Amino acid sequence: MPRILPGETDIYAITDSRLSLGRPLEEVASALLGAGVRILQYREKCFKGGEMLEECRLLRRLTKEAGACFIVNDHIDIAMLVKADGVHVGQEDLPVPEVRSLVGPDVIIGLSTHEPEQALAARGLGADYLGVGPIFATQTKEDVVAPVGFDYLDWVAANIDLSFVAIGGIKTHNIGDVARHGARCCCLVSELVGAPDIAASVRAVREAMAEGLRG
C-alpha cells in the first residue's frame, strides 16, 4: 500500500459531493489523481453506509491504479473493508489507540488537532500525522472549531516532528501565506473539487504554494 504522508507531497485533497458541481465521484477523483494529487481523502457526512462503501471501493481502485494514498475520514469499518491506506479521525471520534487496535500497525492514522496540547499528545497516542487547523474559517465542514490562524501553525512547525497537513479555508489566494508559515502540505476541498477545471486548479494551487515557499 502507498504509505505517503503529508510533507512527502504538497496537496491533500478531500472529496465533497455537495461542492463537485454535480459531477460523479469517479470524474472528480480521476481529475485530481490525473493532475498528480497523491493523497485523497473520502469525506461524506450525509450518505448511508452502503453508498459510502461502494464509493470507497471505487476510490480504492482509482488510487491504487494511480499509486496514490487513500484515506477514509471517520469510518474505520469502511476503511478496513476496502483496505484503505489510512483513516483520519477528530478529537471527538474514536480515540487513536482504539483505532490502532482495529486497523493494525501498518495503516496510517491522521488526527485533527487545534491546540498545542493535542499536538503534543498525538505521537504518544500513535498518530502518524496531524491535521492542523482550521487555519481560516471554513464552510465545508459542520460543527467546526474556531479558526486557529497562523499562531498554532507556527507553533507546530517549530515544535512538532510528526508529519502534518494544514487545513481549513485554504485557497489559491492564501496558500502562499500558509506555506510561508511552515506548511509543506495543504488540504483543499472546495478549491479543487468545486473547480470547473480541476487540473488547472491543481496547477494554480501548486504554483501559488511554490511561490510562497520561495518567499
Image (cartoon, helix red, strand yellow):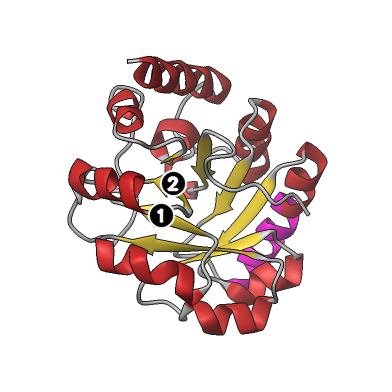
Residue at 65% x, 47% y is: 4
Bounds of the magenta span?
Answer: 49-59
**Viewer-proximal residue, 155 or 130?**
155
Q: Which residue is mark 2?
A: 165
The x, y position of residue 160, in whole percent, is 38, 54
Left or right: residue 123 compared with residue 82: left
Residue 161 on the magenta span:
no
Q: Which mark is residue 131?
A: 1
Q: Are marks 1 and 2 in contact (CB under 8 Å)?
A: yes
* Residue 138 appears in view: no
Q: Quadrant of residue 57?
A: bottom right
Q: Is residue 193 left or right of residue 1?
A: left
Considering only vertical position in the picture, is 40 above or below 108? Answer: above
Check the image and report above or below for 103 versus 193: below
Point 45% across, 35% down: residue = 184
Element type where label 1 sits in the image = strand
